[in-house]
Image (cartoon, coloured by chain):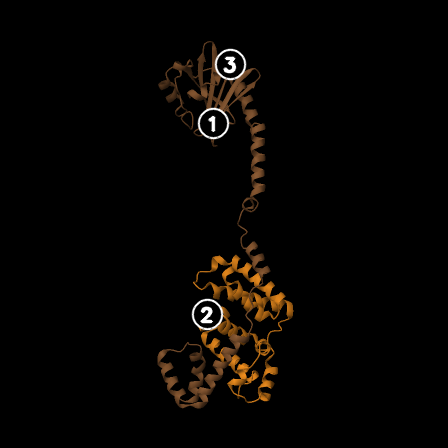
Amino acid sequence: MNCREAGELLNASHDRELDLVRSVDLEAHLRECAACSADLRRREALRSVIVKQAPYYDAPLGLRKKLAGSLAPREPWFARWPALAAACLVLALAIWRVAPPPGSGAIAKEVVSAHVRSLLAEHLMDVPSSDRHTVKPWFAGKLDFAPQVEDLSAAGFTLAGGRLDYLDGRTVAALIYRRRQHTVNVFTWPAGRSDEAPRRESVEGFNLVHWVRHGMNWWAVSDLGAEELGQLPGLL
Amino acid sequence: MLPHLDSAYNLARWLAGNNQDAEDVAQEACLRALTFFDGFHGEDGRAWLLAIVRHTCYDWLRKNRNLRLLGSGEELDSVVDSAPDPEAEQLRNADQRMVRESLEALPPEYREALVLRELEGMSYKQIAQVTDVPIGTVMSRLARGRKRLLAVLGGTR
């Protein structure tokens, strides 16, 4: 190996990027050549002075903070302001508690209208039967859901039959129960929302009770007393 | 990304030349890196980020300074002749200001190679990845950069 060849390898050797075979060759040359050895020593001196004296610029704290902020934009607002989120939640709950959910009032009116219509037009039942095994299959094919049909005679609500009706922009199942001389219309259709506890209402002299269970909307309406009607959610 | 922020800032600082510009560049580069993070499939996150820092820095300098990047060369070459002829001992006596100024006076492609090698401890392969040139080019840039530094800081030849 001559000095020109050695010169080409010095840098790589100095950077520990030289393969073993050529390292051995280079070392052999360096043992014999004072000039190349001096060259290598100067490179080593240069490295040590750079490492020792050249500033390494650490990122300023301000930049780190700024980036930490902007690198986490996916964190939702409610995680960053939990107090505000809690306040919003409380406010929403308060509004929900004080005012009935929007649309509920309108549906209550529809339910009452459907009830009155069923009594006036003498179109109370499409399938007059006290047998739930007659009523339930009758709905099949007429609805895109299977309504739960129970005979509640034991509790004083006698199943009188079933009917199709139209509420809340869709076809629903109407179950007719009798209690003494009172007629009770029970409407049910898929709710598409989570369960709601029974809530009593009174519209135009009729009592209503509404609940959501297992994804089904339930509305019972009658001129029956609110207390008696209020038993239905516990029975169905 | 934040684990390599010091490396990002250090490279930006050496290329941009002052704190304010380095901060702007490092910030923009990190945000770019975040945007393009989906495009990162390698295992060397630092080299990937530093490549973005470098790009961002050169874009930035081109826009804001009419590319005052190259051209310290002549100045250096004149120093070569007037350099005295001491041994490695004198090199070791170079103080912080001398080392910093001589590095800053290097053409940026030599400077970045040396910063990545000596301050970041990167391999030729990593430097090649960051600077987007073949390994042979990395080697020759390091060799030339060192030669100039040796001359300026009191080397021989």
Do badges 2 and 3 share one subunit? no
What residue is disc 3 on? A225
Query: Which residue is located at x 44 percent, y 13 percent?
Result: A178
Residue B64 x %, y %? 64, 67
Q: Amino acid at mark 1?
A: Val
Labels 2 & 3 near each other (Cβ < 8 A) = no
What separation in Å lies between label 2 and label 1 (alpha carbons)? 63 Å
Q: What tint does the image give chain A?
A: brown
Residue B48 visible in the snapshot: yes
Tell if the residue under mark 2 belongs to the same chain as the one under mark 1.
no
Q: In x, y percent, where is residue A53?
A: 55, 75
Residue A174 in sight from this viewpoint: no
Tag 2: amino acid: Gln
| Mark 2 residue element | helix
Badge 1 sits on which subunit? Answer: A
Q: Residue at x 57, y 83 (%)?
A: B152
Alpha-carbon distance for marks 1 and 3? 21 Å
Quadrant location, the C terminus of chain A: top left
Relative vertical location of residue A180 with respect to residue B114 in this rendering, above or below:
above
* Depicted A5 relative to depicted A142: above or below: below
Residue B16 image point, x, y percent: 60, 69
Q: Which residue is mark 2?
A: B126
Disc 1 target residue: A212
Q: Is residue B75 above or below residue B127?
A: below
